[in-house]
Amino acid sequence: MKKIAIIGRPNVGKSSLFNRLVKKRDAITSDMAGTTRDVKRREVVINNKRALLLDTGGLDKGCELYDKIKDMSLKAAHKADIILYMVDGKGLPEDEDKKLFYELQTMGKDIALVVNKIDNDKMKDKLWDFYEFGCDAIFGISVSHNRGTVNLLEWIYNHIPDSDIIDEEAEEIISEPEIPEYENELNDEEFFAQFEDEEDGYFYTDEEEVEDDSIFAQNDKIKEFDENDINHIKIAIIGRTNVGKSSLLNALLGEERSVVSDVSGTTIDPIDESIDYKGKQLTFVDTAGLRRRGKIDGIERYALMRTKEMLENANMALVVLDASEPFLDLDEKIAGLVDQNRLACIIVLNKWDIADKNEFERIKNEVRDRFKFLAYAPIITLSANTHQRVDKLHDMILKINENYSQRITTSQLNAVIDKAQQRHQLPTMHGQVIRIYYTTQYETRPPKIAIVMNKPKGLHFTYRRYLTNKLREAFDFTGTPLLFKAKKRG
Ligand code: GDP
């Protein structure tokens, strides 16, 4: 994908243009684990073409030193394919701007000179002053008055290749979980107030406090176990009757793929069925019921009981929903069991071949709304009958398993947690200062993180929520729950 950088001195309007462009679509591209990024990237869609906008905003915060700005601009420009050089139309062309612009021109990238703050027709004449930059692509715009941006967008559009045209069909397939974005410019009190209606309760008590250091002693053993086990994924296909579970099982097993019956070192129950996929073993647990096609499943209590059993033997759940019909309360009840078992999860919207495709947004929102407890799960639309995107589901299973099995080093974790704490300090508890000493991941599948602190009861749920979001932003935990334990340093 083409990368676009908006470059220019402070206060010329770079962030406004950035926001104007991302408004069209603001999917945050997945963050790369373990890298500190000073430049965020946002996917933008211009008409029907996709590009990545480098968020260089903030690079120049509080920095009026020309050398520093130049340095950072060049860095950003190197990463980009398309450069939008922005100047303030209210002022006169400055030599330093011109020099930097020439330097950027020599990079041989697509570059446009964007003269901002041309707010009215009278201002248009100002544009002439800027022709001395010697740029063919010069645009007088006003982001705040929404003038002239169409021509600029058209220019950008023409510099993105047709291969980046969005495949409308592909667009609908996957919805990544959304990490809520919270305003960072608020004071602490306002900031934490935003979380208040998200969860009940006060001080964080839902995971028991760890009393001793034994979890850390176990670390090595667990790790060894993980590495042997990560190649084996036990998957439960769940959902109410008639959503297409058996059809999906058949589609996933496929005819051409050899069905593995016996793999050394792992015992497979006769009611389980397995395949090899890209070197991993995918075992679908407890499939006898799906095979039998007994519609006895229709009895709610029985359906829930059987689902419970399946989930106890699994590490990943495929929650199957029928996209062609309204969702039912039973769908929610069944999906709720995933949360209790803390499994990796993918939400499958089946029967997409007969669903109303224009309704994707609405259906997606309804899923997100009804299944709030599965906010971490990605959504995929597919058809078990036509096998549309069943292969994508195979790959998604592998990716989610990686996320679910990953181990973040203590230093990587602490870098994120420290930064989060610098932004917003831990609230005090009845006047007592709460302190986090460090955090460490003590288990995987799912990832469990111990927060070692002076007063574990003082970890307010709003703060835990905040830390969860920060970790999900920094690492790819899509599809996996993330558990915390507050531990007293003892
Ligand atoms: P289960 O009770 O959840 O196991 O559902 P089944 O797999 O038995 O499917 C129930 C009905 O839905 C059957 O008539 C299937 O043919 C149909 N079905 C399953 N998947 C799809 C699909 O992707 N598209 C369409 N159109 N029908 C499907």
Image: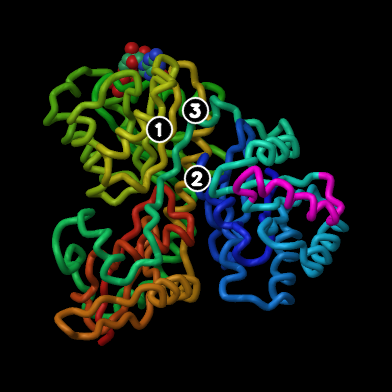
Query: Where's residue 453, x and y in %?
Result: 29, 81
**1 vs 3, front mark:** 3
Q: Earlier in the sequence, mark 2 or mark 3?
A: 2
Identify the residue position indicated by label 1 in the image: 273
Which of the 4 quarters of the picture holds residue 13? bottom right
Display coloring: rainbow
Identify the residue position indicated by label 2 in the image: 27
- Residue 390's label in the rendered image is 3
Q: Nearer the viewer, residue 315 or 453?
A: 453
Q: Is residue 383 left or right of residue 272?
A: right
Mark 2 residue type? Ala
Q: Nearer the viewer, residue 276 or 74?
A: 74
* Residue 184 painted magenta: no
**2 vs 3, front mark:** 2
Q: Is residue 357 left or right of residue 117?
A: left
Residue drawn at point x = 74 percent, y = 48 percent: 125
* Distance from Cα at disc 2 to Cα at disc 1: 37 Å
Segment tinted magenta in the rendering? 118-136
Q: Earlier in the sequence, mark 1 or mark 3?
A: 1
Q: Is residue 200 left or right of residue 320?
A: left
Quadrant location of ligand 1? top left
**Farthest residue toward the front?**
122
- SS class of the residue under badge 3? helix
> Quick check: is the Cβ at mark 2 less than 8 Å away from ligand 1?
no
* Distance from Cα at disc 1 to Cα at disc 3: 17 Å
